[in-house]
Amino acid sequence: MYQQNYDPLGNVFLSTAVAAIPILVLLYFIALHPHRDQQGVRQLGISAPYAAFFGVIAAFVVSCLVFSMPVASAVSAFALGTLSGFLGIIWIVLAAMFLYTMAVVSGKFEIVKESIVHISFDRRLQCVLIAFSFGAIIEGTSGFGTPVAIAGAVMVGLGFRPFQSAVLNLLANTAPVAWGAIGTPIVTLAAVSGLDQVTLSAMAGHQLPFVSILVPFWLVATFVKMEGGTWKEAFEVWPAALVAGGSFALMQFYASGTNELHLMTDVVSGVFSVICTALFLRFVWHPKTRFLLKADREALAAAGKSTASATTDTSEWKYSYTAAQTLYAWLPWIILVLCCALWGSPEFKKYLNELFSGIKFSTTLLGSPFAGTLSLPVWDMPALHNMVQRMPPVAAVSAKPEVARFAINWLSAAGTGVFVAAVLSGLVLKLNAAQWIEAFGRTLQRMKTPVLVIGMVLGLGFLTRYAGTDAVLGLAFTSAGPLYPFFAAYLGWLGVFLTGSDTASNALFGSLQRITAQQLNLNPILIVATNSTGGVMGKMIDAQSIMVACAACYDDPKERSHALGPIFRTVFWHSIAGAAVIGVIAMLQAYVFPGMIPIPPLGK
């Protein structure tokens, strides 16, 4: 039994500093290591696969040499992270990119782009509609990086630059994340903390709506700055930004606290935001000037046209497709939402996991049990399952050893739902054999490097979890005393950065948050929920999400591999600021507005 030691060096500061080494190594090579490219230009950050590899090596050295984790257990933990990451994240993104590529190959994606453009010709509002509102719907159905992939690819298709599209979609994929993949983070948080699920959801719904109102303005300001615009141009579209964010926030506040809708909060909020914004722009208000991309302005100048007149004259933009053609082009995305909603249903998941329950087997793999049914095989990870013990104050004295099982839920996995949606979409779009092969080949070519990086980083995250180095970093926040509500947000932020998932962060720190809240006489509902709401701000800087964005937005493999560092450096301070906003909200709710904390039902 490996018992985690949270102070192996006998000095809390030194132990914490050493525990941070793998993360610091990863960050250094991603964003700060100087090198020169083929043209001799000095750059910061190295290729993503090499950066991830150095981070993994550092994690093994720290875990095994300093924290005395058995080498076999460390290897098993890394393998579990990689395997779980493939089924839980990589499979989703692969299938989502396959669906998108089929839409492009079929030619129907051009109709999708035109229909979006005709909601608003203004590039500022396209950012809000696609990255924020549409992205929230995808987050609510599948999560785990899918909205960044899909919405990012859509924006590139509309003419936005790859770097720009990646950054904007990472910024947008924040406020909805707590209810991603049909509420999986909230369900997990309730399970590990022992608190009421709907109450935790309602608490998150009393924090994130403030952010939801802010995000559209945040997106527009960032985009306008990237395009060399002015603050005046960013502020010009405030009515539409307010409608998009405000309608989303209102529905988010309402749905998150209901038994019927709390797991579908993102979907209903995203749909409501799209409808309200589209109707507002169509019948109530539209900006007097149309903000153009640099590329648009340069093309007009090259053609001898005035960019000033082009911003107001939209008569040339005639929509040439019928309602039936538009609906047909959107069918893949409608199928995606329906399939993900179906696969997210607990009853349907249970049905799929029990579909072949009559076909059972039992054997060993690397000396460890590998058994179950055809629809749900389970492998007890060798040298790891029930062989790692979390210790107080991270876990209760009576806590059971850590479970380390790789459940191969190949039928009920969210990625399978996305893949089914992709296959159905290909059939609906009537792709021929050559188009199927082209879509499959282009997807594999685009995703091979991101798959490698995501697998390594997820393995690193699991290794730090089972070694206990993540808990050492988390404990550093618990000494904040009365300021703990503020730092509870950063603990969740750290968890998402380490694991790439708000769900995993909740599993990692949910129990610790409740224990700390009780020790400091703080409301556990507030503190535990803040783990998830603070965590959403770490989503934009985790390496997995950035690699997904690179895979979706960049066609060139070299650009894709080297884009991780520049993107990370761009979004990092946004992430820090976003977590601070959640921390301030939590502090106000703890000490100034405690009435905003929902009361759980009796007995829960």
Image (spheres, rainbow, N blue to C red):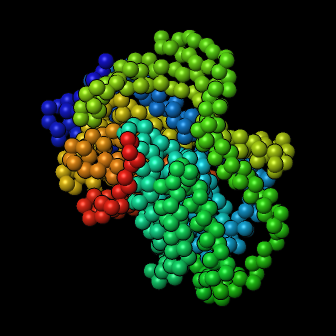
Residue 216 image point, x, y percent: 50, 69
Residue 19 image point, x, y percent: 27, 37
Quadrant position of residue 584? bottom left
Relative depth, front residue between 230 and 326: 326
Above or below, 335 relative to 596: above
The number of numbered badges drawn on the structure is 0
Q: Residue at x 76, y 47 (%)?
A: 425
Relative depth, front residue between 27 and 519: 519
Q: Residue at x 58, y 79 (%)?
A: 291
Relative depth, front residue between 533 and 77: 533
Q: Residue at x 56, y 51 (%)?
A: 260
Q: Is residue 26 visible?
A: no
Residue 170 image point, x, y percent: 49, 57
Taking the view exactly as shown, the residue that stands out farthest to the front is 602
**Quarter of the image with the C terminus in it:** top left
Q: Is residue 128 visible?
A: yes
Above or below, 377 relative to 441: above
Q: Residue at x 58, y 22 (%)?
A: 377
**Quarter of the image with the N terminus in it:** top left
Residue 149 image point, x, y percent: 59, 52
